[in-house]
Amino acid sequence: MAGQASELTEYLIGTKALGRSEDFSPLEDSSVRTRAYELRQRLRKYYTNENPDAMVRIELPKGTYTPHFVVSPPAAPSVPAETRSPRRFHSAAVWTGGFLAGCVVASLAAWAVIGRIQGPGVEPALKRAWAPVAGPDPETLICIGARLYLQVAPYLGTVPDNTPRYPAPHELYALFRRYRDLPKDARLEMEPVQTAMPIGVAGSVAKVLETLQLLHVQFRILPETSAPLTALRDRTAVLFGSPWYSRSASALLEKAPWTTRWDEATKQVGLFGQGPREGKRFVPQRGPRGEYQEVFGLVTVLPNETTSDGGHSIVVFSGLTSAGTQGAATFFTSGTDLKNLGERFRRDGLNRWPKSYQVVVRCRASDDDQLLSSTYETHEILIK
């Protein structure tokens, strides 16, 4: 808007907007491209579902980071033609475009924070897919499985007696300083933590909370360390976790047609078929530097009862990486994807959604394991 569009480069955005250091390399760090992709998707969704008649549309064409403001003339008002001034309308439209741009961006940021959408309606397939979770309980329990990490930080201070603490190896100092300030003589230490989550899982949780808000479902969020599987039984629940780091997910998917586990042949976590799917598998594809390029997510809907006469269900979102988990959640919160899934169920001879099933989702990931896209791969019906 200031006439300096040519200066808006990937390097400038990375260093000035995202806080990357001066040695930031767009070839090695795709964070700017990833955020631009996400912004394009949000804008598309906003103008398609929320404001299709917007007078001013913001577009971010591929290959550029300069937004375009597209003005759509309003319907002709019932005033004499000679009183209308195209020149004055154009000037006002430019001012309004800048104002609405700020409003739209602020609104998108607010939705990302509070997880709310106020749309004209809810896709029927979204209601049907989430009906088991929006069911009998006054609130749905959201359980987040967390991997065991070593937190690296200076000045850890006092830690609980039963928590070990280790000196950080010398190789971590340069990596720590890459994005953080560290005094010259500071010492780095490490301690185990079980309450952190990768960015992809955080995005998954945000997607699900957004959907539950849309469906007016109350929820409560707990880490798996505070809500083990015994606490989830006989309740409507959503679990984020994969068997290789979540005991609850391991138990729930133990006899399912699809589960994630270590693949000895490729030395990485893969998605493996069991029972009728025995011998089938999906393993991630990596790029030349070992970065993930294609991963898989898994949606599992199961009855969650200790007796056979209840109506509680649990939805499990799993993935080979956090991007896979996010891809699974993105698929299962998309009205379009769920509508297509419902069509597949009908082609299977079902006139309603099955009580229990799994869906495998193929995901494209950036080199820093952020989700770029997710598409349906296959499904398996467990209980009709």
Image: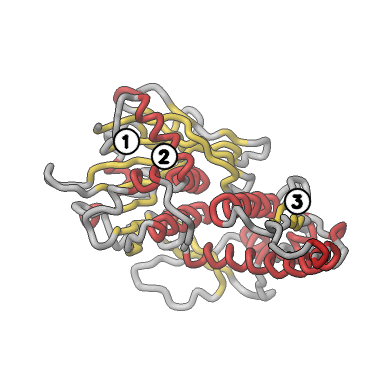
Residue 142 is at least partly visible in this image: yes
Q: Is residue 251 left or right of residue 52?
A: left
Q: Amino acid at mark 2?
A: Leu
Q: Quadrant of the C terminus?
A: top left
Element marked by disc 1: strand
Using the image, determine if residue 372 lies above or below residue 167.
Answer: above
Residue bearing mark 3: 26
Residue at coordinates 55% horizontally, 56% vertically from top-left? Answer: 50
Element marked by disc 2: strand
Residue 65 in which image quadrant: bottom right
Q: Quadrant of the N terminus?
A: bottom right
Residue bearing mark 2: 298
Using the image, determine if residue 271 lies above or below residue 65.
Answer: above
Estimate the spatial distance between the alpha carbons at disc 3 and disc 1, rounded to whole Å.
41 Å
Residues at circles 2 and 1 in contact by the CB criterion of under 8 Å: no
Estimate the spatial distance between the alpha carbons at disc 2 and disc 1, rounded to whole Å.
11 Å
- Looking at the rendered image, the disc whose residue lies closer to the viewer, 3 or 1, is 1
Pinpoint residue 213: horizontal percent, then vertical percent. Answer: 40, 61
Q: Which tag, 2 or 1, sits closer to the chain's start?
A: 2
Element marked by disc 3: loop
Q: Amino acid at mark 3?
A: Pro
Q: Is residue 151 left or right of residue 81?
A: left
Pinpoint residue 95: horizontal percent, then vertical percent. Answer: 77, 69
Q: Amino acid at mark 1?
A: Tyr
Residue bearing mark 1: 357
Pinpoint residue 216: horizontal percent, then vertical percent. Answer: 35, 61
- Looking at the rendered image, the disc whose residue lies closer to the viewer, 2 or 1, is 1
Residue at coordinates 71% horizontally, 58% vertically from top-left? Answer: 76
